[in-house]
Amino acid sequence: MKTKAVRLYGVDDLRLEEFELPAIKDDEILAKVVSDSICMSSHKLSMQGDKHKRVRAPLATDPVIIGHEFCGELVEVGAKWQRQFKAGQRFAIQPALNYQGTLWAPGYSYAHIGGDATYIVIPREVMELGCLLEYRAEAFFMGSLAEPVSCIVGAYHAQYHTKGGSYVHEMGIREGGSLALLASVGPMGIGAIDYAMHAPRRPSRVVVTDIDDARLKRAASIFTVEEARRNGVELRYVNTKDIADPVAHLKELNGGKLFDDVFVFAPVKSVVEMGDRLLGPDGCLNFFAGPTDTSFSASLNFYDVHYESHHLVGTSGGNTDDIKESLAMMADGRLNPVAMITHVGGLDSVPATTIGLDKIPGGKKLIYTHKRLPLVALADFEERGKSEPLYAELSRIVKANNMLWCKAAEDYLLAHAPGI
């Protein structure tokens, strides 16, 4: 079967190509990709080319299909897996395989599997490691958000606290405690607000900061103070840009106390250091942001590490249990990560979007791999709709849904957008 896919040949050398997939073996599965969400990790892969740790062969001779946040349908199942999987079944992928101690992953390391393709061949190791996951929610785009949501889930699970005189690490944020989410109204930060409000283990107070009023207002309109209250969480949004002493201000909002858990969502020295200063006794600081600068550093108060038992953790991705939790919570409506999505495009928009991702404002860029479409912000649908009927109708649909992408918009796009 022929596929169309975006393949990486070297630094920022991304090519949309059509080529023949090999016939599947008895221990492989042929699948149709419907949607993929472009991750900053793919941008970093493109920037680094052969130097990226997940690349396993020279890209010039062994190009890889990029994209690792994808969702679709199984087309043909090899004999080995026919009791477990069926053609027509919807799926999502856990790309972090940890296969035989390697860093190989779909979207980074393979010639025939990646999210930015129309059809793919899923190799045996994905199934053997339990990383091919059944997807039961109605809309495909939610499956493309499962992997980024799992990164958030994993970060919350990686937090830990102790009790005086005990060396046992109690995993997770402090239940009923206080949580500060710094620089947290980007796509992943918004997802962290959602999880804090709806996860089984919740804080009693969440303070969300940023320095952009428009982004704060958007986040507050999606995850409201009232909804948080209904879930037993006191939620506050704060613009720290013009506050002379943001640490003192945030401490005041927390009843005069420092915080049990702090997450940092921007690789900015001053934000990391503010997070350190906000930590209370036995507090845990999670550096969630992934810097591109390999020498990025910030100052920490090691007096407090010693005498106040401060903890520091960093997480990059989630494990298979995290993505299963994400899928289950999305399927039953406890999590709704759609707020992450700010742009939609087709397979032809992937190369330029991936290369320039760090310069494109907004949140997640959602790709429908069987469609030919430019990357367009949801906020720009109305203007584009003045000359293009497709966007006029999409604008009407998202306006009726608080300017959020939704199943109705996906269904309309899949039915009416031009094919690739």
Image (cartoon, rainbow, N blue to C red):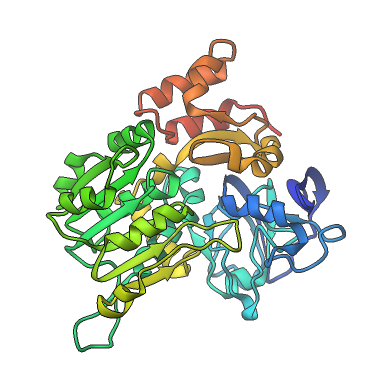
The location of residue 402, given as percent across then percent down, is 34, 28
Closer-to-camera residue (58/239): 239
Residue 222 position in % (x across, y down): 31, 37
Point out the residue furthest to the left here: 255
Report the side of 346 relative to 161 (left or right). Answer: right
Instruction: Single out the residue that lies furthest toward the top.
Output: 386
Which residue is rendered at x = 51% and y = 49% of the image?
144
Residue in the foreground of this view, choosing between 418 and 102: 102
Q: Quadrant of residue 328?
A: bottom left
Taking the image as shown, residue 38 lies to the left or right of residue 52, namely left
Residue 327 visible in the current orientation? no
Image quarter (top left, top right, bottom left or bottom right) of the C terminus: top right
At horizontal 28% and vertical 88% (from top left) the residue drawn is 167
Q: Tell me the quarter of the picture where residue 237 sits.
A: top left
Quadrant of the image occupied by residue 79: bottom right
From what the image shows, is residue 215 above or below residue 387?
A: below
Determine the residue located farthest toward the right in the rendered image.
61
Is residue 176 among what the camera can see? yes
- The location of residue 16, given as percent across then percent down, is 77, 42
- Nearer to us in this view, 364 or 271: 271
Residue 83 lies left or right of residue 406; in this view the side is: right
Above or below for 265 versus 158: above
* Horizontal and vertical percent position of residue 196: 28, 55
102 relative to 222 in the view: left or right: right
Q: Is residue 400 above or below residue 297?
A: above
Q: How many marks?
A: 0
